[in-house]
Image (cartoon, rainbow, N blue to C red):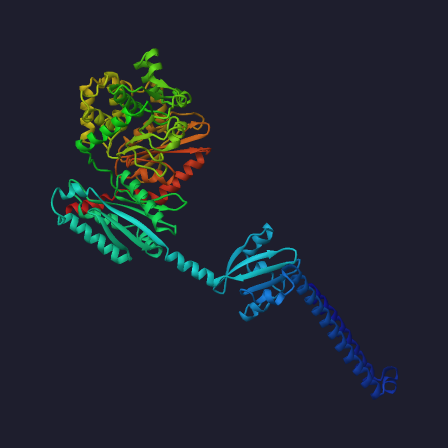
Amino acid sequence: MKKKINHARTIAFITILVEIVGLAAFVVFYFNDFFNTKTVCKPEYIAIGASALVAFNVIMLWASSIRISAYRHKTDLKAAEVIGSDVQEAYNFAMIGLVVTDENDIIIWHNDLFKERHIDVIDLNIFDWQKDLRALKEKNSNEIAKLVINNRNYEVKYLSDAGLWIFKDTTDYESIYSYSKLQAPVVGILAMDNYDEVIKGDDDYNDTITKAKDIIFDYAKEYGILLRKFKDSNYLMLCNFEAYNKMQEDNFSIVDKVRSVSFGEDIPLTLSIGIARDFPDVVKLNELASAALDIAMSRGGDQVVVSVYGKEMEFYGGKTEAQEKRSRVKIRVLADSLINLIKNASNVLIMGHTNMDMDALGSCLGVKAICERVKIPAKLVVDLKATEVKTRAALTSSFNRDELEQLVVSGKDAVGLVKSNTLVVVCDVHIPNMVMAPALLDHTNKVVVIDHHRRAEEYIESPVFNYIDPAASSASELITEFIRFASISPRIELSSTYATIMLSGIFLDSSFYKSKNTGIRTFEASTILKEYGADNSVADDLLKDDFEEYIETTNIVSNLKTADYGVVYAIANVNQFYDAASIAKAANACLSMKGIHAAFVIGKTSGKEIKISARSDGLINVSKLCEKLGGGGHFTSAAVTFLKSNVSEVEEMLLNVIRKYLPEAKADVNKRQGTEEN
C-alpha cells in the first residue's frame, strides 16, 4: 500500500506543479496582454476555467481515495479468507490484534486493538518495530513468538499466505502463571548430621543442639518455611517457590550457620537437606526430597541437594569432608547383612569400575574371600583391556594361569553365569555406566553397592545392600573392616596375596596415608591386613613406576599452567593415550609442589574419551568443581570423563568452571581460623 500511496502522491505533485506553472504563465500573459490575452480571455471565461480546474482536482482526489480504500478492502478480504469469514469476531475475541504487511514487510494495516492502545505503526517496517519477529518469518513455521509491548505480553503468530501477523494478548495468563509458579509447593527434609554423637547420651538441651535448633527455627521464620519435627534430628520443611527462591539466592546460608556453632568440636554438627520442587503432587515431592536427602548424606552431609523434577539435581554446600562415624557395632551389622545375602545366593559376581585400579581389585578380592568362607561360588568380572597397567600386572604376577582362570571371568561371559538367584557385588563405584560390565545390572535384580566416593546423581537403581562411606580412604578399607568385624565364626580367612593387594589399594587411594581422607581406621585396616600376612614392600612395589612411566609423568608436569592463585592445570600430549592412573599420578605430582592447593590434569584415555584428574591439599573442594563438569569424587580427589570432545574444548570448559565456581570451592580457612581464635 505504501508504494501505491507514494505513486498517488507523485501524480498529485506533478499535476499540481503543472497547474501552478500554467497559472503563472496565464497571469504573465494576461497582465502583459501578450497575443491580446485580455481581449480573448473575458472574465466569464476565466471563471469557467477556474471552476473546471477545481472540479478536476476534486475528481482526482476522489478517485485516489476510492482506489486506496479499494486496496484496503481487498486486504481485509484476503485476511478474512485466511482467518474466517467473520473478521470482526476475530478482532474482538480474546483481545487479538491483527497486522498486515506488504511484500517489503511494511505495515499497511492494523485493527482497532492497537489504535485503542495508542500503538500507531502504519507505514513502519515491522522488523524495525519488533526485531524478534524476523526469526518468526524466516522459520516460516507454526512457531509462536513471545513479546512485551508497552508492558503487556503478547504471543505472535505469522500467516505467510496473507502477510498477516496475529498478536494475542496473554498478559492475564502470564500474571496467573507467574503467581501460580511462585505459590507452587516445595518440600524439603532437614537432618542434623552426627546428632547422636553430639548429644553423647545427654538430653535434648545440649548447648550445641540448642543453638543449632534456634538457628533452624529463626531461618524458617525468616523465609516463611513451615517446620514439622518427625524425628529428634529430622524436620519436614514446607514452603512455596517464592520462599525457595529467596533461600537459593541466599545460597542456603543455614548450612554455614549451623556448622559454625560446633566449630572446633571433635564431632561437628552439620546439616543435610533434601529439597524437591517443580511437581504438583506433594506426595511425589516428599519421595524426591527423601531421595535427595539420601544423596546429601551419602556424599558426606553438610550440604543441600535439590531434586528438580525431570532435570539434573543441584548441589549446594559440601564444604567439609565426611567425618569418621563408623562404629564396630554398625560395621558388624552391615557385614552380617552382606554375608546373609551372599549365603542366600546361588553364585556371586564381583566387579569394580572400568579402568580397574588396585583399590577396586583389592576390594573385589576381599568380597571373594567372604564368598570363599561361606562356600558360595564367586568370580571377579574383569576385562583386562579395561584394567589399568599396574592392576593387570598385579593380577598376572600374583596368580598363575590356572588360578586366574578360576578367579576371573570376562564381562561378556559373566552374563551367561547369571541365574535367578545370582548376587552382583559392585565395589569402588556406584555409577551404572562406570562399572566393568554394565550389562550385568540389567540381568539381575540383586545388586550390592560398596563404595567410598561421594554419591553422584546417577546411581545403581534399587540395590539390595547399599554402603557408601565418603569418610573412608578406600573401598579396600571398608571391606577389610567387614572381614575383621563380622560375627561369623570361625572368622573369615584372607590369603596373604589378597591382603597384599588390598593394602596396595589403600596405599593408592590414601596416597600412602597423605590424603585428607586418611583416618585412624585407615591405619587400623592396614594393621588388620598386616595380621593377615600383607607384605607392605610388595604392596609398594605393585604401585611403583617403571622408567617410562616416570618420564611420562615428568613430561605431563612440564606443561603446567596457572589457572588461578594456587590452582594449576596440565595438558598431556594430545597425540598419546594415557591410563587413568597415569593422569592421576601426574595430578598428585603437581600437588607435591609448594604453594599449589589444587591441580588438574587433562589427558586422552582413548580416541573418544578425555579425562580430567583433580587433586587438592584440602583447601579447595575439587569434587565441587568436577561435579560442575559432570564428574565427582572426594573433597580432595575427583575426576571427570568426557566423550567425543577435543582437548581444547575440555580445557576451556575447565577454565570456565574454575573462574565461576572457585570461590565456592575454596575452604573458608580464614573464617574458620577467626572462629577458632574467638
Query: Is residue 128 shown left or right of residue 419?
Result: right
Image quadrant where one finds the N terminus: bottom right
Name the quadrant containing residue 401: top left
Residue at x-position 33% and y-position 32%: 430
Residue 171 seen in the current view:
yes
**Which one is nearer the viewer's eye here, 8 or 204?**
204
Residue 651 percent location from the top left of the image: 41, 36
Name the quadrant containing residue 268: top left
**Which one is nearer the viewer's eye here, 476 or 133?**
476
Residue 297 percent location from the top left of the image: 27, 40
**Which one is nearer the viewer's eye here, 293 or 359?**
293
Looking at the image, which residue sits at the far bottom?
Answer: 43
Residue at x-position 27% and y-position 50%: 236
Name the quadrant containing residue 201: top left
Residue 345 percent location from the top left of the image: 31, 24
Question: Relative to residue 675, is residue 67 depicted above or below?
Answer: below
Count of picture labels: 0
Residue at x-position 26% and y-position 16%: 497
Residue 511 seen in the current view:
no
Query: Is residue 374 shown left or right of residue 416?
Result: left
Residue 74 percent location from the top left of the image: 70, 65
Question: Relative to residue 185, is residue 400 depicted above or below?
Answer: above
**Which one is nearer the viewer's eye here, 420 or 544?**
420
Query: Is residue 34 shown left or right of residue 455?
Result: right
